[in-house]
Image (spheres, rainbow, N blue to C red):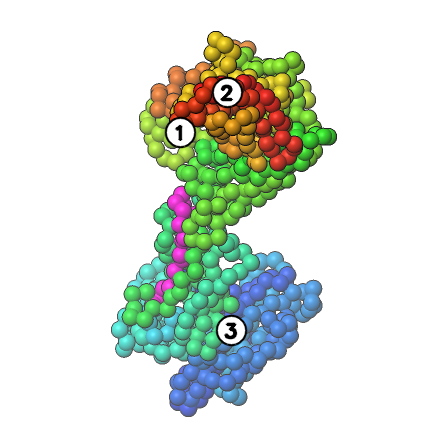
């Protein structure tokens, strides 16, 4: 919608002043006019845009400088006088009249424009509350045309409304002029059918040039006509409205435009998140319009369009301000990409040479972390902290969290991730990597930090679980360190899993979701908070009454049966501290023969499997770890086949699962099998809180664990023929860069 420019001219007769109609300028006389938009301002610093138009005696655009002088107030140079340079016969500036700086700022303030020995004046009405002014223009002392007041009318009052204050020269641009004519006596509209004549000295009242006059009969006192530029040159169109022998004059600048370019402002955002992210989803995009002289062109309509990112949108149009700038709002959709906004001077759309510009593009990136693809891992999960004395030996591990949104797109906005360890220490918080290009890089959305064993020690001792190996009061999980990563985001939901199977990119009641408890460093691995354990008391919405504000309750809460779109999502990762292998925690897994010996055949091999754990039945950390074997005598060979350099906890396995959970009447959860979001949701899932949904679990198991390092001692027999069998003692050496090697005589073997 165009901004309305309303020009209201008060009868001079009402003011007790008699004004006579004045003739138009004669050939050879220069002409200058000045207008103010808006015509009235307050005395607190509101601004009005002043536009000066000048023509020489031949009707060509004026050149040189024009001097403006204000009776009160300030121009944009903070002075009462300013000199402007004309370009295409036009110049603009800004005027304000703050009473705090000038006590004369009240009522009508006269501003004079002087150019080529001719002058023009305009009054800007300054009011402390409400009020307005004539805002019309005086055509100048050497130009008797009144640019915005009634031409001496004593019978009629003219009220003019226009859908734009200025037009673009050299185009098919147009302005709709609506005149409301009332009789002074009785303030009644002129009779229906009264002819009102519109005359212009520039442009045309038809799309093609040549129609300088048109007459439109009034209806309800109103009459409208469209003034077209009709490809006319830059300058000022002086329009005269005539009715029953009386007239009113006004002017419309035809502004030359040359080019447009994108302007980066302090409000412009470098990138946006997806619409569903709720984070920085809009940004202003600004363009500047200038003329051939490089000056800003105000009051011109600009149209906008966007491409490059599906679902992105822009405010379709705007009008250039006093600085020649027009701004649209770019709004992200739910698709990533680079949104490119194109601005076009509306009057030049579809022409051979449109005046337009495109901005470089705003990346629309994944914005809100979702639990669906939130992953946490560390490059070292078995840390040799128990090598050497005193423990812990300082060992570090690089841990990373990967953030993606509900669509699986890496989160491209810098996002802080908090880290909390059970033991040791960790650098926290750290920001995830923002997207810097037009598409996500491999590390976009990653938050990387360093964990070190230096800090709290030892980890919390725990009782053994069923199936877990224990030696005395030691078990493998005694040396497990729980680390959690926490970030603000939303819980995972399975879009389209509800009864109506609607895929709409958002959670709907009745769809499966993964319900998270509050972030918890669960040091005893039982899935609930126990005294002494760290947790984060988060603000939560009570989904039984969403109108209540989110609140904390000072205690740990498990899964609440509600899908939370604004919460703290989190993931655990488990590290283990390991040490030197313990000679008392060694066993051969391959039995000897009946003689208690291991027989190595001639021209053959014999394998003996072993298990060797540290004091807690965990394996050595894989960095700089290995085994070697030696034999006494010279017959045959011996070697160790082992994966000491391959990661393993040694004494346990840990799985991170999503399982079905049902809330019981006493508030406890019954955990079931793995969650299948393709299965029908249980009855009652449309109403929150739901009883049955998915939850995340940490499941330790001990199936197939080695309870330390496992390996194979391979003995290769002699070749050819020999005399009597030879007995050899086999020694096994455990090597690690953090501590001296441990050597054990493990068995005797007979080489044939």
Which sits earlier in the primary sequence, circle 2 or circle 3?
Answer: 3
Residue 418, located in which quarter of the rendered image?
Answer: top right
Query: In the structure shown, which secondary structural element does the residue marked by tag 2 occupy?
Result: strand
In the picture shown, does residue 331 fall above or below 418? below
In the current view of this chain or complex, which residue is farthest to the bottom? 28
Name the foreground residue: 681 vs 192.
681
Mark 2 against mark 3, which lies toward the viewer?
Answer: 2
User: Few, some or many C-alpha atoms within 10 Å of disc 3 (few <14, some 14-19, many ≥20)?
Assistant: many
Query: In the structure shown, which secondary structural element does the residue marked by tag 3 occupy?
Result: strand
Residue receiving disc 1: 494
Q: Which contiguous range is marked in magenta? A: 332-348
Image position of 157 (left or right of 627): left
Which sits earlier in the primary sequence, circle 1 or circle 2?
Answer: 1
Residue 130 in the image, given as x and y percentages of width and height: 58, 58
User: In the drawing, what numbered circle is on residue 92?
Assistant: 3
Residue 261 in the image, given as x and y percentages of width and height: 44, 67
Which residue is rendered at x = 47% and y = 11% of the image?
Answer: 593
User: Few, some or many C-alpha atoms within 10 Å of disc 1 (few <14, some 14-19, many ≥20)?
Assistant: some
- CA gap between label 3 and label 1 equals 58 Å
Mark 3 against mark 1, which lies toward the viewer?
Answer: 1
- CA gap between label 2 and label 3 equals 109 Å
Which sits earlier in the primary sequence, circle 3 or circle 1?
Answer: 3
Name the foreground residue: 667 vs 221.
667
Residue receiving disc 2: 726
Taking the magenta stretch, the answer to whether it contains residue 531 is no
- CA gap between label 1 and label 2 equals 68 Å
Residue 186 in the image, given as x and y percentages of width and height: 45, 61
State the quadrant of the C terminus.
Answer: top left
In the picture shown, does residue 32 fall above or below 428? below
């Amino acid at each position: 919608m165009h901004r309305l420019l309303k020009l209201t001219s008060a009868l001079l007769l009402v003011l007790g002043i008699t004004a006579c109609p004045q003739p138009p300028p004669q050939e050879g006389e220069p002409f200058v006019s000045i207008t103010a938009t808006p015509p009235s301002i307050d005395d607190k610093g509101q601004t009005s845009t002043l536009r000066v138009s000048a023509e020489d005696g031949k009707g060509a655009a004026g050149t040189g400088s024009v001097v403006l002088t204000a009776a009160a107030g300030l121009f944009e140079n903070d002075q009462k006088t300013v000199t402007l340079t004309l370009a295409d016969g036009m110049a603009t500036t800004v005027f304000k009249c703050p009473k705090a700086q000038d006590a004369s700022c009240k009522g009508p303030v006269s501003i004079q424009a002087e150019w080529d020995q001719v002058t023009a004046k305009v009054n800007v009405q300054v009011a402390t509350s409400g009020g307005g002014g004539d805002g019309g223009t005086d055509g100048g002392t050497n130009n008797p045309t009144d640019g915005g007041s009634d031409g001496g009318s004593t019978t009629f009052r003219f009220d003019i409304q226009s859908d734009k204050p200025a037009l673009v020269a050299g185009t098919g641009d147009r302005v709709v002029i609506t005149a409301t004519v009332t009789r002074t006596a009785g303030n009644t509209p002129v009779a229906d059918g009264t002819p009102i004549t519109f005359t212009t000295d520039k442009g045309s009242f038809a799309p093609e040039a040549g129609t300088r006059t048109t007459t439109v009969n009034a209806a309800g006192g109103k009459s409208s006509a469209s003034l077209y530029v009709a490809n006319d040159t830059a300058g000022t169109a002086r329009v005269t409205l005539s009715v029953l022998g009386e007239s009113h004059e006004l002017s419309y600048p035809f502004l030359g435009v040359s080019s447009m370019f994108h302007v980066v402002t302090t409000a412009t955002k470098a990138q946006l998140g997806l619409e569903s992210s709720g984070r920085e989803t809009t940004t202003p995009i600004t363009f500047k319009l200038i003329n051939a002289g490089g000056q800003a062109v105000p009051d011109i309509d600009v149209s906008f369009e966007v491409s490059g990112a599906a679902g992105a949108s822009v405010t379709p149009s705007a009008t250039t301000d006093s600085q020649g700038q027009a701004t649209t709002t770019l709004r992200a959709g739910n698709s990533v990409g680079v949104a490119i906004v194109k601005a076009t001077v509306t009057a030049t759309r579809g022409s051979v040479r449109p005046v337009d510009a495109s901005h470089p593009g705003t990346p629309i990136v994944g914005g809100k972390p979702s639990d669906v693809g939130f992953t946490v891992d560390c490059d070292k999960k078995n840390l040799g902290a128990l090598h050497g004395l005193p423990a812990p030996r300082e060992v570090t591990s690089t841990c990373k969290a990967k953030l993606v949104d509900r669509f699986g797109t890496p989160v491209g906005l810098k996002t802080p991730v908090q880290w909390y360890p059970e033991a040791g220490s960790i650098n926290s918080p750290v920001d995830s990597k923002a997207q810097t290009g037009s598409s996500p890089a491999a590390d976009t959305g990653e938050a990387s930090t360093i964990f070190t064993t230096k800090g709290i020690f030892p980890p919390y001792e725990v009782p053994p679980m069923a199936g877990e190996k224990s030696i005395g009061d030691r078990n493998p999980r005694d040396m497990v360190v729980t680390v959690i990563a926490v970030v603000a985001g939303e819980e995972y939901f399975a879009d389209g899993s509800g009864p109506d199977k609607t895929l709409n990119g958002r959670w709907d009641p009745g769809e499966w979701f993964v319900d998270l408890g509050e972030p918890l460093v669960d040091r005893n691995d039982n899935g609930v908070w126990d005294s002494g354990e760290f947790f984060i008391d988060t603000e939560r919405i009570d989904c039984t009454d969403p109108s209540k504000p989110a609140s904390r309750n000072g205690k740990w809460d498990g899964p609440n049966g509600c899908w939370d779109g604004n919460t703290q999502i989190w993931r655990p990762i488990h590290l283990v501290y390991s040490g030197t292998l313990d000679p008392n925690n060694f066993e051969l897994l391959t039995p000897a023969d009946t003689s208690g010996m291991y027989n190595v055949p001639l021209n053959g091999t014999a394998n003996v499997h072993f298990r060797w754990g540290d004091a807690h039945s965990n394996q050595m950390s894989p960095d700089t770890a290995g085994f070697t074997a030696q034999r006494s005598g010279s017959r045959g060979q011996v070697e160790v086949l082992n994966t000491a350099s391959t990661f393993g906890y040694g004494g346990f396995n840990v799985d991170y699962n999503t399982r079905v959970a049902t809330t019981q009447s006493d508030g406890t959860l019954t955990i079931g099998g793995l969650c299948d979001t393709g299965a029908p949701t249980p009855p009652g899932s449309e109403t929150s809180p739901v009883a049955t949904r998915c939850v995340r679990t940490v499941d330790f198991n001990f199936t197939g664990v080695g309870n330390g390092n496992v390996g194979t001692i391979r003995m290769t027999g002699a070749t050819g023929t020999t005399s009597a069998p030879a007995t050899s003692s086999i020694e096994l050496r455990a090597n690690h860069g953090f501590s001296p090697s441990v050597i054990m005589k493990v068995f005797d073997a007979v080489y044939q």
